[in-house]
Image (cartoon, helix red, strand yellow):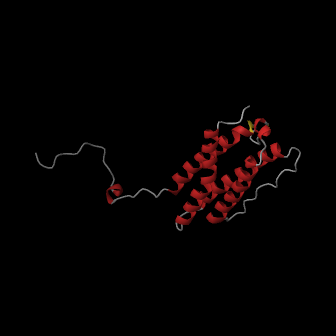
Amino acid sequence: MARPKRRELEEALLTLETTPLLLQKLAASRTAGNLRPLVLELSRMAGRESELWGRFIEQVVRPGATPALPFEDPAGADLFVAVNRFAAARRRNLRRLRRVPGAAWSQTARLQDGRTLSVSELPAAMAEADRKSLAEISRLAAPAPRRDSRDQIPFNNASPEPALR
């Protein structure tokens, strides 16, 4: 498999580089409310970054290397801890990707989820996973819809009678 087109690679890498910044901005803006769903999604992202993508890169760059330690997500991690774990794992993976020699971009490895990817396909797969996670985080972080007093009134489906005839 050939190395990806430069533009496609740059777009994927831009997504990979900016996702931690977006998450850090989100964490700084969220100080109240139920943050647990956000923390769980961010912890999933950090785990995927460490275990799925990190191990894949390690397999290709250093075949036969000792697998990375499993990702640990201690109960009770807060939003900033989850974001920082993801950001650290992402920085490590981007450094590794930048060191992949030209000939290795066609090498393939099997992901833990059973898919086989080449190194050239990896940045796009990572960027797509980021987009999906960011969409879910946006949904979770969106303010609850406001309810006005009219929402509290039971509604009768019968057609309304005109007050005056």
Farthest residue in the bottom direction?
31
Name the spot of residue 106 as percent of width and height, x first: 76, 35
Residue at 70% x, 63% y: name it. 75
Name the spot of residue 153 as percent of width and height, x first: 32, 56
In-image side of 24 versus 121 (left or right): left
Residue at 60% x, 53% y: name it. 19
Farthest residue in the left direction?
165
Residue closest to the eye, 16 or 139: 16
Looking at the picture, does residue 92 appear above or below residue 157? below
In-image side of 17 versus 140 (left or right): right
Quadrant of the image containing the C terminus: top left
Total marks drawn?
Answer: 0
Residue at 70% x, 56% y: name it. 91
Quadrant of the image containing the N terminus: top right
In-image side of 30 versus 93 (left or right): left
Residue closest to the eye, 64 or 5: 5
Residue at 30% x, 47% y: name it. 156
Name the spot of residue 3 as percent of width and height, x first: 71, 36
Where residue 107 sits, quadrant-wise, is: top right
Residue closest to the eye, 129 or 95: 95
